[in-house]
């Protein structure tokens, strides 16, 4: 199996030694003095190295991600210590398997240069370089999200970024969107709590957040949620400490992870899953595919799978972290999707943003290449630096040995054959009809937008955490309009009547 060292060293040129060359290999006369028409004349256009050097410099950044622009990452391995083969046939989850991996950790709303410690949800995205292709789990440091339908995602991100008129972050925009979108309540209660300001990347948990599916060798399917629990423990800044660190070191999380790995203090996370039998999903307390909801650990206890360790820093940040193209559509056999509409939307949106940011052949970049052989009919496009073998066909079906899909016969187009359910994506025995429709999530007995936020506040947060929540909420309200101010009070009253009153009283003191 390819190890982490092989992954990190991909695409690395031999170390430069001696005289420099241009990108085409030609010798460079001078890196210091350009060519001019006379000692005090203008630069000349045919100073090839000057033009190439400046032109490449002007293009050396790729467009930043829209959400999750500010990030950092590292490499390591996933170790499977337990036997979960009764739930999944995926090779990377079989007992004793060690799989090289990468992780990228990020904020959501801030730009590429923004501070790591601004109050925000933090991205927690993992890639596993498996024998069956790349498998990506693209989640956050919270088990839920603000939305349950991807059609609202652009609106949500717009509301969290900058006011188009002033170019400034706007509390009024944020609270106006949140309070008019009740399903955000659970996530906002996490965001305004301690988890909104993790102390370091190493001291936070991660979650796949979505509901996924595992399929075993017998073809039996299970719904699954991923939990990654920090062996370093969970530590958070207070709002004041986070703001202070933002002024001291905007790259605090990036530097902490990099420095820890450099000194050999390799962070580890235990990997757990919650497993829900397919038959139990239909009548569970709340819709198990709703990303704004979590599953009770009392109902579905966490099952240990193994752990992962990050133990190698990137050789080049731009090539290996900025250009790593993590994508929830990167699946492997034994893992599938679910009817989670946010997940379904992300399956398209992530790959499409990568095609925009780094080109149609982004999967050819060394950090994005799988460790197993690629056999594809894709060709051409910008920066297609891998090419098919001489004489190999670029169409299917064909008369050559280049084949087709594992369900195809490899001889003809099979246009009259029905393959049956698309079990490579997910098994859904009860899709509630097949007609195209625009319908709300199927309501379960305890489905309500504020119920889990209220449970989080009343049953999970202690008195000190409740006080910090109120303080964080009222700090974040600075700048709201009178109308949105009243919306905020009602929003938190819907979570918990006493909480709404406390927010009103505390904000009155701060106005």
Image (cartoon, grey):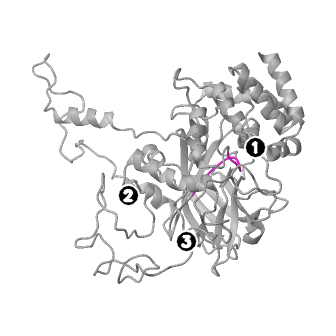
Does residue 255 appear in this view? no
* Residue stretch in magenta: 137-145
Please give the label number shown on residue 186. 1
Please name the residue that numbered disc 2 is placed on.
Answer: 364
Q: Picture quarter containing residue 297?
A: bottom right
Residue furthest to the left in view is 38
Q: Circle 1: is it few (<14), some (14-19), or many (20+) Cα within 10 Å?
A: many
Q: How many discs mark residues in the rendered view?
A: 3
Instruction: Determine the secondary structure under disc 1.
Output: helix
Q: Is residue 51 left or right of residue 63?
A: left
Cα separation, mark 1 vs mark 3, equals: 32 Å
Residue 425: x and y in percent read: 56, 67
Residue 363: x and y in percent read: 41, 57
Q: Circle 2: is it few (<14), some (14-19), or many (20+) Cα within 10 Å?
A: some
Q: Are marks 2 and 3 in contact (CB under 8 Å)?
A: no
Cα separation, mark 2 vs mark 3, equals: 24 Å
Marked residue nearer the N-terminal end (2 or 3): 2
Vertical placement of residue 262 versus 419, above or below? above
Residue at the spot 65% in from the left edge and 66% down from the top edge = 431
Please name the residue that numbered disc 3 is placed on.
Answer: 424
Marked residue nearer the N-terminal end (1 or 3): 1
Instruction: Determine the secondary structure under disc 2.
Output: helix
């Amino acid at each position: 199996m390819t190890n982490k060292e092989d992954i990190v060293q991909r695409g690395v040129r031999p170390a430069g030694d001696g005289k420099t060359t241009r990108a085409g290999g030609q010798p460079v006369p001078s890196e210091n003095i350009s060519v001019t028409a006379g000692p005090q004349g203008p630069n000349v256009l045919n100073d090839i190295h000057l033009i190439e050097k400046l032109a490449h410099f002007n293009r050396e950044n790729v467009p930043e991600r829209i959400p999750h622009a500010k990030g950092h990452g590292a490499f390591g391995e996933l170790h499977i210590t337990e036997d979960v083969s009764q739930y999944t046939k995926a090779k990377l989850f079989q007992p004793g398997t060690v799989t090289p991996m990468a992780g990228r950790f990020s904020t959501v709303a801030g730009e590429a240069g923004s501070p790591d410690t601004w109050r925000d949800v933090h991205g927690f995205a993992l890639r596993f370089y498996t024998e069956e292709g790349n498998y990506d789990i693209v989640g956050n440091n919270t088990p839920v999200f603000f939305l349950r339908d991807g059609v609202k995602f652009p609106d949500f991100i717009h509301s969290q970024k900058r006011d188009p008129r002033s170019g400034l972050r706007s509390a009024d925009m944020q609270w106006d969107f949140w309070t008019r979108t009740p399903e955000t309540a659970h996530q906002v209660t996490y965001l305004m709590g301690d988890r909104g300001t993790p102390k370091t990347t190493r001291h936070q948990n991660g979650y796949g957040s979505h509901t996924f599916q595992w399929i075993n060798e017998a073809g039996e399917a299970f719904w699954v949620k991923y939990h990654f629990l920090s062996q370093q423990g969970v530590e958070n800044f207070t709002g004041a400490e986070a703001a202070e660190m933002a002024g001291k070191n905007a790259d605090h999380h990036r530097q902490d992870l990099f420095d820890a790995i450099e000194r050999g203090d390799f962070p580890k996370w235990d990997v757990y899953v919650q497993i829900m039998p397919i038959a139990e999903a239909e009548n569970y307390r709340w819709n198990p595919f709703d990303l704004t909801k979590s599953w009770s650990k009392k109902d579905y206890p966490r099952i240990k799978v193994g752990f992962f360790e990050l133990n190698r820093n990137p050789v080049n940040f731009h090539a290996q972290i900025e250009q790593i193209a993590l994508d929830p559509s990167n699946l492997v056999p034994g893992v599938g999707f679910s009817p989670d509409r946010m997940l379904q939307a992300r399956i398209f949106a992530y790959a499409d943003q990568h095609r925009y940011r780094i080109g149609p052949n982004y999967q050819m970049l060394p950090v994005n290449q799988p460790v197993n052989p690629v056999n594809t009919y894709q060709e051409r496009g910008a920066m297609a630096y891998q090419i098919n073998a001489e004489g190999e066909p670029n169409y299917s079906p064909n008369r050559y040995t280049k084949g087709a899909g594992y369900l195809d016969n490899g001889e003809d187009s099979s246009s009259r054959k029905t393959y049956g359910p698309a079990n490579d994506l997910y098994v859904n025995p009860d899709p509630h009809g097949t007609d195209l429709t625009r319908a709300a999530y199927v309501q379960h007995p305890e489905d309500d937008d504020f119920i889990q936020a209220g449970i989080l506040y009343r049953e999970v947060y202690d008195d000190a955490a409740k006080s910090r929540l109120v303080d964080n909420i009222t700090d974040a309200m600075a700048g709201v309009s009178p109308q949105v101010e009243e919306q905020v009070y009602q929003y938190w009253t819907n979570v918990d009547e006493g909480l709404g009153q406390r927010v009103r009283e505390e904000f009155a003191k701060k106005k």
